Image (cartoon, coloured by chain):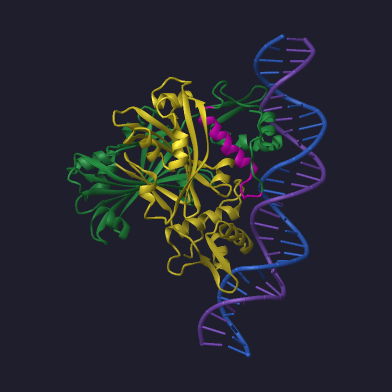
Chain colours: A yellow, B green, C blue, D purple
Amino acid sequence: MALKKVVERQTGVALWRQIADRIRLSISNGDYDATGMVPPETVLAQEFGVNRHTVRSALAALGEEGLVRAVQGRGTMITRKDRVSYPISRRTRFSQGLGRQVKEIGTRLLGHAEVPASGEIAAALAISPGSLLIELRTVSSGDGRPLSMSFSYFPVDRFPRMAEEYSQLGSITKAFAAQGLDDYVRVSTEIVARHADADELSQLKLSPGAIVMEAQSVNADLDGKPVEFSRTRFAADRMKLRIET
Amino acid sequence: MALKKVVERQTGVALWRQIADRIRLSISNGDYDATGMVPPETVLAQEFGVNRHTVRSALAALGEEGLVRAVQGRGTMITRKDRVSYPISRRTRFSQGLGRQVKEIGTRLLGHAEVPASGEIAAALAISPGSLLIELRTVSSGDGRPLSMSFSYFPVDRFPRMAEEYSQLGSITKAFAAQGLDDYVRVSTEIVARHADADELSQLKLSPGAIVMEAQSVNADLDGKPVEFSRTRFAADRMKLRIET
DNA sequence: CCAAAATGTCTATTGATCTAGACAACTATA
DNA sequence: TATAGTTGTCTAGATCAATAGACATTTTGG
């Protein structure tokens, strides 16, 4: 690649960060698979048309993320590569789809509360605004790396023990089952991507400027009655969403 | 909101850009719907814990995007709000779902070529690697703003006139129909989000650091035979994807 | 062992970003 | 028509980002 890769100046995004983003993309595209190493700093500096020190800042940031590791005299090795694929279908169950991609799945309940339904959530769940909901805040990780964080809402009158059951069973599917709901399906999902806010940065252990995909979805029982509204944020550089229709 | 909204320093993303991103998000969340205006610069400066000039840089950037307009003495008004919602289902047709959200939809053929199928595309289309494909490069816009850009691939032996038909008819559905394919469905979609590269920045008229959602999908005829592989990049701050299951 | 190639460290300088303060210009309203 | 509240403009200084060059340190391979 003798071509000059363009980075833009005076845009509020430092050159070293633009370059870090581009290299991260190249890594996940497999552009460096032949050697398992990032090209030398001097080569990258020339490709991007910047000083070598600027490239070094970019590589240092990727090192912080645990994506590469530099060894003096040898070069900069790639230590991690792929995104985990998360399936979205009528019957998405968190742990099922991820099972083969990561060795160990962890879910952690950050907290729960009883809250009145906002207009938006009430409409999605087909209940009246102000009805009481149980809110669960959870973080899920694969092999120790945070992958997603969720806010989930359940009608308290139908699932009064949601928080307790979830914290014991560690799974929403099992918590539903323990309260008499054996099966449910996803009825709608909306996805947006945006920059992570401060809370997401810390919960998902991301570096500033990172991207999250937010999926807003509604699950319903087999009679079509909504049982759950949730907003899940995925760390975009660790996950891809697979839609199954 | 008396709470201090956190912005982070020394992260390679200028404060004014972080603040612009946060305000853009607040606008699309409807946080300012009561007044239709952004809070005064002095208030924002206090909320974010920065100098008023820094907030002014952020608002100037949003002004460039056409999102807000400042009027001396009055305040800064919101001139545009929502993300366009793009439906993804078995029967997604580009123009249908968008019809009610934007007044005028434009699609432009950037170019076309005959290319051999890469391993990945060959597998998706269930053909042998190296088979000839027609590649279409298109950009779509709503009310003059670019919304998405696509690379689409079709088997040349089955749809030899794809480029000509598309450039005449301006629609893939119609181009299929003109070549004897009356109906088709989406069979798989994968979505990732990442920072836009230089080509995407210029084609979609984005500012550096902006986010694109990339949807990679396969369409098939009613016999299940794949007819199209496409990679579409959506400007993340202008679009949301609605999954219909 | 030596040379080439790679990363690590240091200094100095320039330009972009952010802060700070003061004041002008304009709008709405009491 | 004052006056409070808001955006617009200017100046000056501090901090961060990027360039430039020199040289040290480590690894690899001839």
Residue in the foreground of this view, choosing between A166 and A30: A166
Q: Nearer the viewer, residue B108 or B11?
A: B11
Question: Is residue B144 rendered magenta in the image?
Answer: no
| In this picture, residue A176 sits left or right of residue A81 | left
Answer with left or right where residue A245 lies relative to residue B70: left
* Quadrant in which the N terminus of chain B appears: top right
Main secondary structure found in the magenta portion: helix
In the visual, does B11 lie left or right of B167? right
What percent of the width, then of the height, locates residue B157? 20, 54
Q: Is residue C11 left or right of residue A204?
A: right
For the point 24% across and 53% down, the residue is B155
Residue C25 on image: x %, y %: 72, 24
| Magenta residues, start to end | B10-30
Q: Where is residue A177 drawn, in percent x and y?
A: 35, 37
Q: Is residue A101 above or below residue A163?
A: below
Q: Quadrant of residue B31?
A: top right
> Can residue B110 be seen from the camera position used here?
no
Based on the picture, tell me whether residue B15 belongs to the magenta stretch.
yes
